[in-house]
Image (cartoon, rainbow, N blue to C red):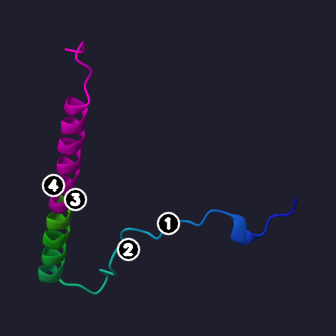
Amino acid sequence: MIFSDEDLPRKPAPLFTPAKIDGLGATELAGYIAALEAEIIRAREAVARLDAHKAAAALFFKKPDQA
């Protein structure tokens, strides 16, 4: 059987594309860093929410004989 490229799984789109920072000054770089740090905090909060949801589901579906 012959497969074409269309049959192969596609690579997911990148979640983050770094900005070009070569021409930025110190103030612009500081702002860029602040924006990245805010995005990291947002992503960590999303992970925490998912972990809490998973933990709640695990408690809900826990078998009675499990302590």
Circles 4 and 1: CB distance less than 8 Å? no
Q: Nearer the viewer, residue 5 or 56?
A: 56
* Distance (Cα) linking label 2 and label 3: 16 Å
Dot 2 amino acid type: Thr
Disc 3 designates what residue? Answer: 43
Dot 4 amino acid type: Glu
Q: Secondary structure at mark 1?
A: loop
Looking at the image, tell me whether mark 2 or mark 3 is earlier in sequence order.
2
Q: Main secondary structure of the magenta part?
A: helix
Magenta stretch encompasses residue 55? yes
Circles 3 and 1: CB distance less than 8 Å? no
Looking at the image, tell me whether mark 4 or mark 1 is earlier in sequence order.
1
Dot 1 amino acid type: Pro
Q: Identify the image quadrant of residue 34.
A: bottom left
* Distance (Cα) linking label 1 and label 2: 13 Å
Dot 3 amino acid type: Ala
Disc 1 designates what residue? Answer: 12
* Residue at horizontal 73 percent and vertical 70 percent from the top: 5
Q: How far across and how far down the image is residue 65, in percent?
A: 24, 12
Q: How far across and how far down the image is residue 2, in percent?
A: 86, 63
* Left or right, 39 with reference to 3: left
Looking at the image, tell me whether mark 2 or mark 4 is earlier in sequence order.
2
The numbered mark at residue 45 is: 4
Magenta stretch encompasses residue 27? no
Quadrant the C terminus occupies = top left
Disc 2 designates what residue? Answer: 17
The stretch of residues the image draws in magenta is: 41-67
Of badges 2 and 4, the one in the foreground is 4
Q: How far across and how far down the image is residue 57, in percent?
A: 23, 38
* Distance (Cα) linking label 3 and label 1: 19 Å
